[in-house]
Image (cartoon, rainbow, N blue to C red):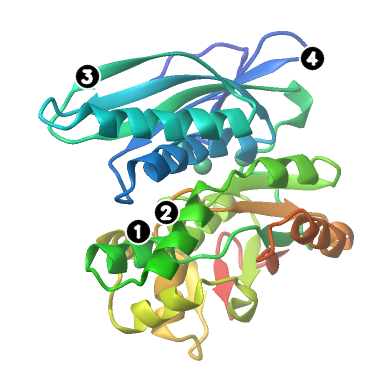
Amino acid sequence: MKFPTDSNLIVGLDRPDDAGVYKITDDIAIIQTVDFFTPIVDDPYWFGQIAVANALSDVYAMGGVPKTAMNIVCFPINLDISILRQVIQGGIDKMKEADVVLAGGHSVEDSEMKYGLSVTGFIHPDHILTKKNLKVGDRLILTKPLGTGIINTAIKGGLASGKIIEQVTSLMAALNKDAAEVMKDYPVHACTDITGFGLLGHLAEMVAGSGLGIGIQTGTIPIIPEALEYAKMGLVPAGAYKNREFREAMVDISSSIKQAVLDIMYDPQTSGGLLICVESKCADELKNKLIKKGMKDTAIIGEVLSAPEGRIVVE
Ligand code: CO
Ligand code: CO
Ligand code: CO
């Protein structure tokens, strides 16, 4: 398909990234993104918060600041209107936390509830972080633990405890705002957020066409402990298998890696953390700063290698 072009569209569909970026002047560009989905938790207020944290995340992943948002609402007429009110309230409260203003929105009748946002953010045109631009020796930092897709599968199966539901809900509702602010002070070369393609899917997007490789040390990856237990029980969402099918040809896996760990690396995340590619000499300092700022599970999980070209080595 041939998409329309414009010299001011700096990041567009010719090289898909977390969001589109359009240059307005030499000093300012707008970041645009849209995301909405069906409820992933039972509590409507929390669902609203998660949907907003997820929609804003792509702006943070580009290194930008989200400013305005429009609600996108799909709602069945036979559902109690107070549920919709709670969803919207959760969304508004999360936008307030992010210092984002709701500028409007649109709702349609649908067979299943859906909620999300279209978001506009700002960035300096010279400071855009994309999935590309990896440099040999860079370290990869992940700011949230993995396993939310597997835990959500366990929740749907009625197997998760109230405590773990609460934990994973607040994890998904946590903004990537602080992570984006902290990384601005460091020599970050590339960034993305971990969502539906899982860790390995998003690493594959980063390494593809880079002429470089990526090495991942599985022992350092932050994982929600219960997710590992559920993965061992086979509670793995269909999306994880799809992600593996799509990307396994790019991944070299050491024979010592357990299947459950691999499942978690392909597990589709909802509102996952930022994956930050930073110059090696600053990696420890950035990691410690992120932990100090409250992202306590932040870890350095791997590095950029000169070879094997376009591949991910999992050890
Ligand atoms: Co993204
Ligand atoms: Co998105
Ligand atoms: Co990015």
If you read the primary sequence from the N terminus, does the residue marked by circle 1 or circle 3 appear first? Answer: 3
Dot 2 falls on a residue whose secondary structure is: loop
**CA separation in Å, label 1 and label 3:** 33 Å
Q: Is mark 2 within 8 Å of ligand 1?
A: no
| Other residues around mark 4 within 10 Å, as few (<14) / some (14–19) / many (≥20) | few
Residue identifier under label 2: 197
Residue ranking furthest to the front: 82
**CA separation in Å, label 2 and label 3:** 28 Å
| Other residues around mark 3 within 10 Å, as few (<14) / some (14–19) / many (≥20) | few
Foreground pick, 13 / 175: 175
**CA separation in Å, label 4 and label 2:** 33 Å
Side of 136 where 92 appears, left or right: left
**CA separation in Å, label 4 and label 1:** 39 Å
Dot 4 falls on a residue whose secondary structure is: loop
Asked if the residue under mark 3 is in contact with the one under mark 2, i.e. CB atoms within 8 Å, the reply is: no
Residue identifier under label 1: 246
Coordinates of residue 304 in the picture (x, y in percent)? 70, 62
Coordinates of residue 142 in the picture (x, y in percent)? 64, 60
Residue at image position (55%, 11%) is: 6
